[in-house]
Image (cartoon, grey):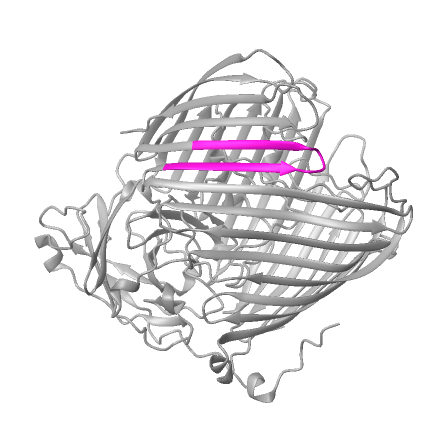
Amino acid sequence: MLCVFSISTTMASQAPVPVQPAARREIVVAQATTPVVVDGALTDAAWTAAIPTEGFVQSEPFTGQPATERTTVRMLFDGAALFIGAMCHDSDAASLVVKDLRKDFALTGQDTFEVVIDSFGDKRNGFLFATTPAGARADQQITNEGRDINASWDGVWTVRTQRTAEGWTVEMAIPLTALRFEPGGEWGINFSRRIRRKNEIDYWSPVPRSFSLARVSLAGQLLGLSDARPGRNLQIKPYVLAGAVRALGDSAYDSTSHIGLDVKYAVTPALTLDVTVAPDFAQAEADEQQVNLTQFSQFFPEKRSFFLENAGLFYVGDAARNRMNPTPTPDEDLLLFFSRRIGLSPSGSAVPILAGARLTGRAGGFAIGALTVQTESAPASPATNYSVLRLRRNLFGASDVGVIVMSRQNTADTADYNRVFGADANIRLYRILDWSSYVMRSVTPGVQDDQYAARTSLNWEGPFFHGKAGLLVIGRGFRDDLAYYRRTGVRKYLVDTGLRPRPAWLNRVGLRELHPHVAWNWYTDPSNRAIARTLHSGMTFLRKSGAYVELSHNAQMQALMQPLQFPNATVALAPGDYSWAEWRLLTQSDASRTFSGTATINWGRLWNGTQRSVSATATVQPSAQWRMTVGLQRTSGKLLLPGQSFVSSIVTMRTNYSFTTNMFLDALVQYNRDRRQINTNIRFNFIHRPLSDLYVVYNEQRFTTDGAPPGRGVIVKFSQMFPF
């Protein structure tokens, strides 16, 4: 096992650099008395009235130090939209890193300018808008300071950029209808700039390196909007879909066509109603297959737009993670609300949805989330109603309490239902110390005992030390038909801790940070019998470029409850208690380079045998328009009993081409060696107007072991958003 806490006294003596100013930073919005043309030039006469602000400070690499390049920001307001103009000076403007034109690009691999707007002024939630020197657009919805970050949220806004000899300029126009706010209320705002060739992150209102722009409580104040009114906000978005589909093994195609409607209406300035009728998600990205050698089903994230918007309001769980992983890792032991349970069968096939409605926002001092969806009857899936009600109340500076109620009801059988209800609290005890807890109870016909679940955890997230300890309890009778979880009748004790020292000598060897860490999980049944345990001990070496290498030792025990079948093995592994340990090497190169890659290599024991596994990707990106990634997941092993060898592997190829910032082509090809199956998913997307899309999707599934006709499908989907 690695000795991960042998740290010199010079490292341990590091203390966080104070970055919170004595007074909250302020920026005043000037009134635009003449029209603003969004072209990235910042030459309109209106900008002369805007008061500039600068003074950005580093979060990375030297927290609290002045930014190495100047950034100047101005803001205007014309009664209908906010305008943000930024001059991003750069002493080496020819070396700007631009990697993407795609909508919702990855923020970490290139130069960016970002803004987060806390339109409710609650210092918890916000809307993030980001761009690059090439004018790409990304927007996100931030909930509870990063407990949930919804990258699939889309707002109607415009941005243009220009590159100059002195750097690059940004001009954004964000209509008030893209935001939610209460007239006369307080607004918060923060700006961030990433200088990728230096791996530098700067903020206007300082943010410690432990956190990101999602730490809304550290934002400055936006003044000058006391007279802002959102006005009427009604969006009607119909769609039409047509296509032809042939099932695997069939010889004939079946035609398909659908029409549907999405409506968004601002019931009040702070409360929004979304209604969908006959939604179809044929354009959603295909799931990427994974090698699974565990006794549990795999977790696949939600990708359907209707369920992603405002999803963070329904999240109940742990505190936000540190900057290395800014959003929580899905809690696969119990993710209380998992929307993939709605409209998808256990095998992943679509179950038709008749209609759905969602009401989200604020009223009476509460954050409100209400969701109801009705599905049609399908093979092995009766017509069902799924409903969720969520209320949350802010407390003190950055704490909150809430309740949630979830229901699944078979609409043809009143005795077939499942209800879950409970309460949660997230308490900020100190600016980097959070306590998160919840208590839940389920009600299911025929089940009487142990219908409860509870969790509590304490999380310290500092620049030098981070630590978390917690307890999760799931009763044997607990059932949540809107959740993802692995087992019931379990207690989980967890500890996750580590250091992030940055001694001066690291720079001389090309490193920025060391990260020795330990993560320990212990699972018992209600009688305190150990049924699983894991101990991860690792050391991460973070390079100045953002590349990193991690070496870890992972010991675990698993109580196998049912026989486990491995690929290509004729005899299953028998139930029983198994203990083993493995070594893992994890590496990721500089993602801003033309050629980059990742690799995870495991070797050592597995169950009662041995293994050698690799999961690797290689990416080539010669321009901001085109990217291709090839990936391999392969595990070879040998079971001592029953004495059989096995090999499991999946090969993937993903390519993306951006014709413009509004037109994209994406392709994903996957080969599963165990099934001898090739899956292909190709998507063309043209954003012809804001929130209006044309999709052309091609899917194919074929086996390489026989001559059966492959399954194929072509779908064309057109949507048009009409604002009123």
Residue 273: x percent and y percent? 41, 33
Give residue 379's quadrant in the image. top right
Compared across the picture, whether 184 is left or right of 406 comes to: left
Residue 57: x percent and y percent? 34, 72
Does 676 appear in magenta? yes
Residue 523: x percent and y percent? 79, 56
* Most distant residue in the bottom direction: 9
Would residue 143 be seen by someone viewing this image from the given angle? yes
User: Against 517, is 416 above or below?
Assistant: above
The residue under the point 62% across, 49% down is 423
Closer-to-camera residue (149/271): 149
User: Against 155, is 588 above or below?
Assistant: below
Compared across the picture, whether 461 is left or right of 21 comes to: right
Quarter of the image that includes the C terminus: top left
Quarter of the image that includes the N terminus: bottom right
Does 207 appear in magenta? no
Give residue 421's quadrant in the image. top right
Closer-to-camera residue (478/241): 241
Give residue 418's quadrant in the image. top right
The residue under the point 63% across, 65% down is 458
Q: Main secondary structure of the magenta part?
A: strand
Instruction: Please give the range of residues in magenta.
Output: 664-683
User: Against 132, is 354 above or below?
Assistant: above
